[in-house]
Image: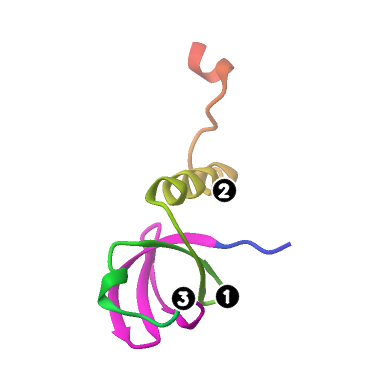
């Protein structure tokens, strides 16, 4: 099983690389699978797997995926009907 982490492009390093913020952790990511890196990608969201951007996604999908990953890691409470009544 593979997992891709959502993140937002915050800057362009060069024609092949962008810096992507993935939940507060910023990494330089290869953008070759997205046709290279350019200024128009700043602010857009991508799924990142092993240092490569593999797909562009919506802001909403990025935020929801990150929320679920935080729940799995135990960093956020899981929203359940039982926890809402307490």
In this view, 18 is above or below 4: below
Task: State which tag comes first along the sequence, 2 or 1.
Answer: 1
Provide the residue designation for mark 2: 73
Q: Find the magenta span and give its range.
A: 5-33
Q: Secondary structure at mark 1?
A: loop
Q: Earlier in the sequence, mark 3 or mark 2?
A: 3
| Near-viewer residue (76 or 32) | 32
Q: Position of residue 76 (x, y in %)?
A: 48, 39
In the image, residue 4 lies at what x, y percent? 57, 62
Q: Rounded to the nearest whole Å, what is the CA distance between mark 2 and mark 1?
A: 19 Å
> Which secondary structure dominates the residues rendered in magenta?
strand
- SS at badge 3: helix
Query: Gap in Å between the C-alphas at discs 3 and 2?
Result: 29 Å
Specify the quadrant that holds the N terminus. bottom right
| Residue 86 visible in the picture | no
Q: Nearer the viewer, residue 86 or 13?
A: 13
Which residue carries the number 1 mark?
50
Q: Position of residue 56 (x, y in %)?
A: 46, 63
State the residue position of label 3.
34
Residue 45, placed above or below residue 72: below
Q: Are marks 3 and 2 in contact (CB under 8 Å)?
A: no
Instruction: Please give the name of the residue rendered at 54% of the width and 43% of the height, measured from the top-left corner.
Output: 68
For discs 1 and 3, the disc positioned in front in the rendered view: 3
State left or right for residue 60 relative to residue 75: left
């Amino acid at each position: 099983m593979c997992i891709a982490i959502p993140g937002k492009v915050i800057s362009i390093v060069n024609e092949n690389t962008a810096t992507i913020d993935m939940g507060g952790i910023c990494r330089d990511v290869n953008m070759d699978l997205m046709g290279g890196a350019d200024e128009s990608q700043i602010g857009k969201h991508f799924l990142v797997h092993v240092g490569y951007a593999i797909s562009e996604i919506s802001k909403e999908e990025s935020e929801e995926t990150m929320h679920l990953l935080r729940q799995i890691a135990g960093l956020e409470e899981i929203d359940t009907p039982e926890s809402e009544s307490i």
